[in-house]
Amino acid sequence: MHIYFDDIYVFTQDKDVQVHVDALDRVLQRCQEQQLYVKLSKCQFCVEEIPCLGDFVGRPGVRMDPDTVRVIGDWPIPRTKKQMESFLGTTVYASRFCADFAQFAGPLHESTKGLHPKETLQLSEHQLECFHELKRRLSTPPELQLPDFDKPFGIRMDTSNFAIGGVLFQNEGGLEHPIAYTGRKIKPAELNYPVREQELLAIMHVLRVWRVYLLIYRGDKPQEHRD
């Protein structure tokens, strides 16, 4: 069971429905003891997938909300700073579904520097390509696999002239299944770092972001993959 503010998520791994019903019964009994009320119209029982914090979580994994996918896919080319900031503000919440997000979002952030909110953008050819590629990737996002803490994790890291990033994944059936993506823009001072130090930045970043996964893992050390 997980509790997030006023939301309660009850889940079981056993395929026996009765196991799930028993777990749900214990939770409802505790709510009754504490005089906590749940609204029936907001409850979902015995489902394979539920909406959770803007995503959909189920047995297969985690997927983006289809409404968010559709909104991003239909987004027109931003013409002002305010429109670009609105686009970036929407996509950043879906960044964990997008490989190399920071690499494509960075040039779009640069396009708004020094402009007033309603001032017209002058997008370069490269910035337009970044906009369309970001839209394309988030219009067809992958389904992220749920982590199995009894299996080894793989970490793939990458650095560029503009950003660092990585993907956390697990191998199954000879295929890499992504669990999450991460990344950030390289700071101005970090642009002067040698390549090896920029690679170290990427390592430090992914270990900081995914330390919980790696600390809970019950097997050998995680596998490292570098591009």
Image: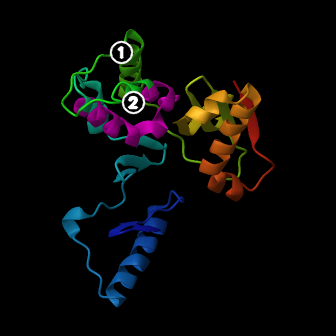
Residue 103: give x, y in percent of width and height: 51, 26
Amino acid carrying label 1: it is Leu
On the picture, is 60 further left or further right than 24?
Answer: right
SS for callout 1: helix
Name the residue rendered at 79%, 47% in the picture. Answer: 221
Residue 46 position by quadrant: bottom left
Q: Is residue 26 above or below residue 183?
A: below
Structural crowding at the residue carrying mark 1, measured as other residues with C-alpha within 10 Å and reported as few (<14), some (14–19) or many (≥20): some
**Where is the C terminus found, in terms of image quarters?**
top right
Q: Which tag, 2 or 1, sits closer to the chain's start?
A: 2
Name the residue rendered at 52%, 29% in the picture. Answer: 99
Nearer mark to the viewer, of 2 and 1: 2
By secondary structure, the bulk of the magenta-drawn segment is best described as helix
Residue 116: give x, y in percent of width and height: 23, 32
Task: Please give the residue where the numbered disc 1 appears in the rendered image.
Answer: 128
For the question of whether residue 148 can be seen, the reply is: no
Q: Is residue 221 above or below residue 92?
A: below
Residue 135 position by quadrant: top left
Query: Magenta stretch containing residue 95, yes or no?
Result: yes
Q: Which mark is residue 109?
A: 2
Q: Is residue 104 above or below residue 186?
A: above
Say if mark 2 contacts mark 1, CB within 8 Å: no
Magenta-drawn segment:
82-106
Q: Residue furthest front?
A: 114
Q: Between residue 6 and residue 30, name the one nearer to us.
A: 6
Amino acid carrying label 2: it is His
SS for callout 2: helix
